Amino acid sequence: MLAKTFGSAVYGVNAKMITIEVQVGQGMHFHIVGLADSAVKESEHRVEASLKYFNYKMPRQKVIVNMAPADIRKEGSAYDLPIALCILESSEQISSVHNLEDYVIMGELSLDGKLRPIKGVLPIAIEVRKQGFKGFVLPAENAREAAIVNNIDVIPVETLEDAIAFFEGKNSIEPLIVDTRDLFFTTQNEYDADFEHVQGQENIKRALEIAAAGGHNAIMIGPPGAGKTMLAKRIPGILPPLSLPEALETTKIHSVAGKLGTNAALVSRRPYRAPHHSISDAALVGGGSFPQPGEISLAHNGILFLDELPEFKRTVLEVMRQPLEERKVSISRAKMTVEFPANFMLIASMNPCPCGYYNHPDKECVCGPGVVQKYLNKISGPLLDRIDLHVEVTPVTFDQIASTRKSESSAQIRERVIKARERQTERFKDNKEIYSNAMMPPEMVKKICTIETAGTALLRTAMERLGLSARAYDRILKVSRTIADLAGSDDIRVEHLAEAIQYRSLDRENWAG
C-alpha cells in the first residue's frame, strides 16, 4: 500500500514543498531515496524506536521512502514525523480519518516519541497557505510561530501518539490561533535600554538621532569607558517601529537560522546584533555547505554593531562592502544560489589608537610615531566611504555622571525620528527601492540636496581648510538633508551644512597626526 503526505525544505528564506511517499512491500531493508542527507537517512532508527515506544511495529519488509523532487537536497531531522505516519498507514497499522495528503507534516522525533522543535517554520507556514493545504501539523513548541500565518489550521502535537490520534479521529486538536496584530502592537515598543539613563553625551545622542532619522551608518571614535557600547545598545529604541511586513520578513530570517527560541511567534522589535571581533567571513555574511543567514541578515531591519572595528579581520570587513550597497547578500554554491536580505544600519565603535588615549583631554597617548595612523588604516577607504557619520566620543565628566537632571527619553527622540522618516517616505514615494536619505545614489543627491550660495561657499571652505576628502562631499549633503528633515525644513540651510561637516572626523587630512 502506498501512503503519501507532504513536508518542506527551506532554501534561503523561502520554502519548497517536498512530497513524501512510503511503500511497504515484499522484500527486506529500509531505503530512503530522493537526495537525502545522512540526518534524513538516520530517521530509520529514530522512527523505529518511537513506534516501539507506543506499541507499534516497524515493518520487517521492504520499506521505500521516496522524497520528491529528487533533484532537491533534503537535510535535517524534521522529516521524522511524516515518515513515521506514512509507514504506519502504508503498513495498515492505522486508518486515517483525516487524509495525510491534505496536510504538511514536520517534526523531529526523540526515542520516546516526543517531538522536538524544528527550524524555518514561518516560511514553511507561508508556503502551506500559498499551496492551499488544509493545515500544518508540527511540534507544539513551533506552533505559535506558524500560527501568525492566518487561513491555515496549525495543529500542535506533543508526541507521535498525539499525531496518530489526530489523524485517526480519536483526538480532536483545536487549531492554534494567534492574533498577529495584537501580538505585534503590544510588544513593538518594549526596549530594555533607554537614552534617559545616559547622563551627558548630548552631542553623541544628537549624532545618533541623525543616524536613525536618515538610516545612516555611523562610527564612534573614543577612549575606553566613554560609553560607546552603552549608546549603541540604545539605538534600536529610537528607530521607527517595524511595520508588520518588515516584522514578518525579519521573523522569517530568524526562523530559518533557528534563533527564535521555543514558543516564540513574531520578531516585533528591531534586531540588534553585536558579533565578537573573532567572527569569520561566513558567520558574518552567511554561508556553509547548506547556506544559512549570517549576522548581517539577522540584523536585517535593525542594527549591526561592530565593537572595536579595527580588531576585526580585514577580510571580514571587506565582505560587507557589497551588502552595504545592495542591501542583500547572494551566496552561490555549485548546485544552488540563495539570497538573504541584509538591509541594516551599521554602527561601529573604535579606540582612536592601540592604547586608546589619542586626543584624550586628560590622559597622554603612549603610542609611537605612525602607530595611530597604522591603527586607523586597518579600516579600508572603501568601507569608510560607506559610513556617513564619524563621531568623536569624549569621556563623561564627574559633574555629568553625578547630575540628577533627567535626560531625554528614547520615546521623545523616536517621535522626532518618525516625523523625519515620514518626510522621507513622502519624498521617495515614487521609488520603492529608496526610503531613506542614506540610500540615495549620487545622481539623486544632486537633484534633491540642493544648497544655496552661502552653503556652497561654506562647504568649499570646509573642504579646503579642513582637508576633507572628495568622498565626504555626498555624505555631507545626505546628512545635512536629514538634519533639515529633523528640523522640518524643506531647504538645506547653512546651519544644517555646518552641523553635517563636523561629522566627518576621519576624512580630515592628518587627523591622526
Image (cartoon, rainbow, N blue to C red):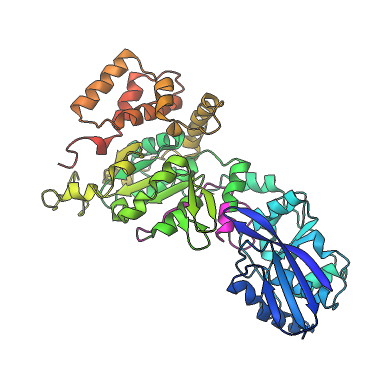
Q: Does 263 sit left or right of 254 as displayed?
A: right
Residues in magenta? 253-278
Q: Is residue 124 magenta?
A: no
Residue 497: percent from the left, percent from the top?
33, 24
Instruction: Give the farthest residue toward the top.
Output: 453
The reply to whether residue 173 is visible in this rendering is: no
Residue 513: percent from the left, percent from the top?
14, 41
Count of all numbered marks drawn on residues in the image: 0
Q: What secondary structure is the magenta-colored segment mainly?
A: loop
Q: Which quarter of the figure is the N terminus placed in? A: bottom right
Q: Relative to the observer, which residue lies in front, 405 or 287?
A: 287
The reply to whether residue 314 is visible in this rendering is: yes
- The structure residue drawn at horizontal position 37% and vertical position 43%, both measured from the top left corner, is 404
Residue 74: percent from the left, percent from the top?
62, 65
Q: Relative to the observer, which residue lies in front, 366 or 472?
A: 472
In this rendering, is residue 409 above or below 372?
above
Q: Relative to the observer, which residue lies in front, 147 or 418?
A: 147
Q: Relative to the observer, which residue lies in front, 203 or 426?
A: 426
Q: Is residue 268 magenta?
A: yes
- The structure residue drawn at horizontal position 49% and vertical position 29%, both measured from the top left corner, is 420
